[in-house]
Image (cartoon, helix red, strand yellow):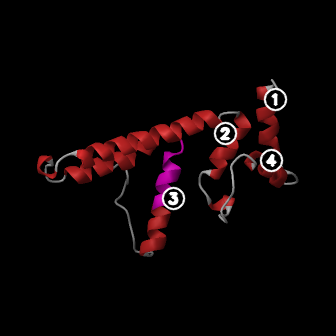
Amino acid sequence: RGRDGEAREAWRRGLTDPAVAAQVRARLRREFGSDDGDDPAGLWWEPLLEQAVAEGALPALAGEAFGALDHMYALLAVRYADEPADRRPGESHEVLGRAVRVPSDYAWGPLLHESFAERLRLAMGPTAALPPGWPDA
């Protein structure tokens, strides 16, 4: 306690040591809640949560995630609240595009975009393709 730099280094070393990594990961994850059967290795956000806990930055990460969610919701809610007659053609697509790009500005944004692309491929088959440069194109 009170030795944040040393603690971060101990967590980092523990996560990279194959002999104790599973125990260190379990210790870091004890605050995450239940897994609901998901494989933690398959969830893109698990390494981010582990790193945030190890660095004492979990409140900052939660603030980022809720800020992004709030921003995305506001973009979509404002559009939804408009009267249909007030909407110009193509405006809904534009607003959805802006909402999808909100996470791009965060360190974890590309991981979310990759997760979506993979889920799309799983749902639509190997021929499913997003436009080049998606979502920022």
Q: Under tag 4, what secondary structure?
A: helix
The quarter of the rendered structure image containing the N terminus is: top right
Q: Pick whichever of labels 3 and 4 is earlier in the sequence.
A: 4
**Region of the chain picked out in magenta, as a range:** 107-116
Question: What amino acid is found at the position of numbered circle 2 in the picture?
Answer: Ala
Residue type at numbered disc 1: Glu
Q: Mark 4 highlights which residue?
A: 27
In the picture, measured across the screen, residue 23 lies left or right of residue 55, that is: right
Judged by depth in the image, the label closer to the viewer, 2 or 1, is 2
Nearer mark to the viewer, of 4 and 2: 4
Q: Which mark is residue 6?
A: 1
Q: Residue at x 49, y 72 (%)?
A: 122
Sequence-wise, the earlier of marks 2 and 1 is 1
Q: Residue under circle 3?
A: 115
Left or right placement of residue 120 versus residue 33 in this view: left
- Observer-side mark, 3 or 4, equals 4
How much space separates mark 3 and mark 4, taking CA atoms? 26 Å
The residues bearing labels 4 and 1 have C-alpha atoms spaced at a distance of: 17 Å
Residue 52 is labelled as: 2
Q: CA distance from mark 3 to mark 1?
A: 33 Å
In the image, residue 119 sits, relative to residue 54, either above or below, namely below
